[in-house]
Amino acid sequence: MNNNTSTLANSCVLLVQSCDAYEDVWEMFFSALADHWKHCDLEIILNTETKTTVFSGLNINTRNYCGDYQAASWGDRLLHVLSQVDKEYVVTLFDDFILEGEVNETKLNHCLTLLEANQNIAAFYFNNIPGESSQGYEGFRKLGKTTDYKVNSCPAIWRKSALEEVTGKIDSPWAWEFFGSVRAYGDKYEYYCAEQDCENTFIYQYQLGGAIRRGKWVEKVCDPAIQKYNLQLDPLIRGYASESLSEGKYSLKWKIDFMLLGLRMVGPRALIPLLRGVMSKVKRVLR
């Protein structure tokens, strides 16, 4: 057994964020995980509503939200799962982060050591997060008090209690990042992200958003994985997303519902990221 993995398994669980509607991506995700994180013995919790899965060599916990109840929001499900975790730390990945390189267990263990030594650290993100930051630990930047997307869905190792504190029952994944970050403004915790040239812990095509965008497959991610792992998956059922990241804009109704959800989540403070977003678009137009 790899000593690095064994150390992690004693203190962490691996939480894979998903939902029943993404069941078709699970075999791809776990094939890549097993390939690039060999001998991983962390307990893996698949956060979904009602379905379960198994994969040879991986310790996937078959607990899900609660039986056949499917109406729960993403935030409610996340809090429910975390309430069952008996470890202090949680490694988080989303189900369409299809790994393409070896997991850097040495860096994971280094971050775990730092978390244990400093109770003020909430999370280490393994991707770079643009915005206000300052010098942190080697390979990591410390995010500013009010940095946008301070709460982030990129691969991370979290202190479980901090993850619970920044999550609300009504949150959606997108609102959790955008409005949930307000919950972390100026709080007692420190958040760190990888420096731009040090994003080597979980390697996937994050520039493309992962394997699924707006409910459809990202061809450059899914097709090589289907071929590599000989998956019996027909991508035409879900369809392919446009290669343009800006194509397929959200409807006005979606935007209004999103803003209303933000107000329900954090009250008037939801206006802070909204106004920042508007100002950022105005600046881009005026350039």
Image (cartoon, rainbow, N blue to C red):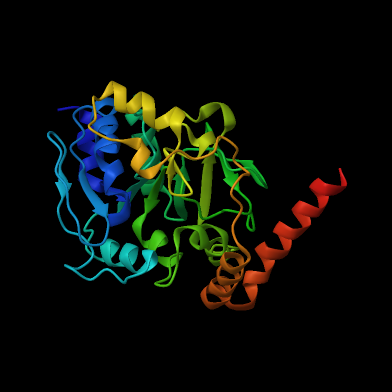
Which quarter of the figure is the N terminus placed in?
top left
Q: Could you say which is closer to the camera, residue 173 or residue 83? A: 173
- Residue at image position (47%, 56%) is 120
Percent position of residue 131, x then y: 66, 46
Relative to 239, say whether 151 is above or below. below
Name which quarter of the figure residue 26 lies in.
Answer: top left
Residue lying at the far top in this picture: please name it.
228
The answer to whether residue 221 of the structure is visible from this angle is yes
Percent position of residue 272, x then y: 68, 66
Relative to 79, say whether 200 is above or below. above
- Residue at image position (45%, 38%) is 240
Percent position of residue 42, x then y: 21, 42
Q: Could you tell whether 17 is left or right of 191 in the image?
A: left
- Residue at image position (23%, 64%) is 65
The answer to whether residue 201 of the structure is visible from this angle is no
Percent position of residue 67, x then y: 16, 67
* Number of on-image labels: 0
Q: Could you say which is closer to the camera, residue 246 or residue 119? A: 246
Q: Could you say which is closer to the camera, residue 260 or residue 121? A: 260
Name which quarter of the figure residue 228 lies in.
Answer: top left
Relative to 257, say whether 198 is above or below. above
Q: Could you say which is closer to the camera, residue 120 or residue 240? A: 240
Q: Could you tell whether 282 is left or right of 23 in the image?
A: right
Residue lying at the far front in this picture: please name it.
236
Which quarter of the figure is the C terminus placed in?
top right
Relative to 218, say whether 24 is above or below. below
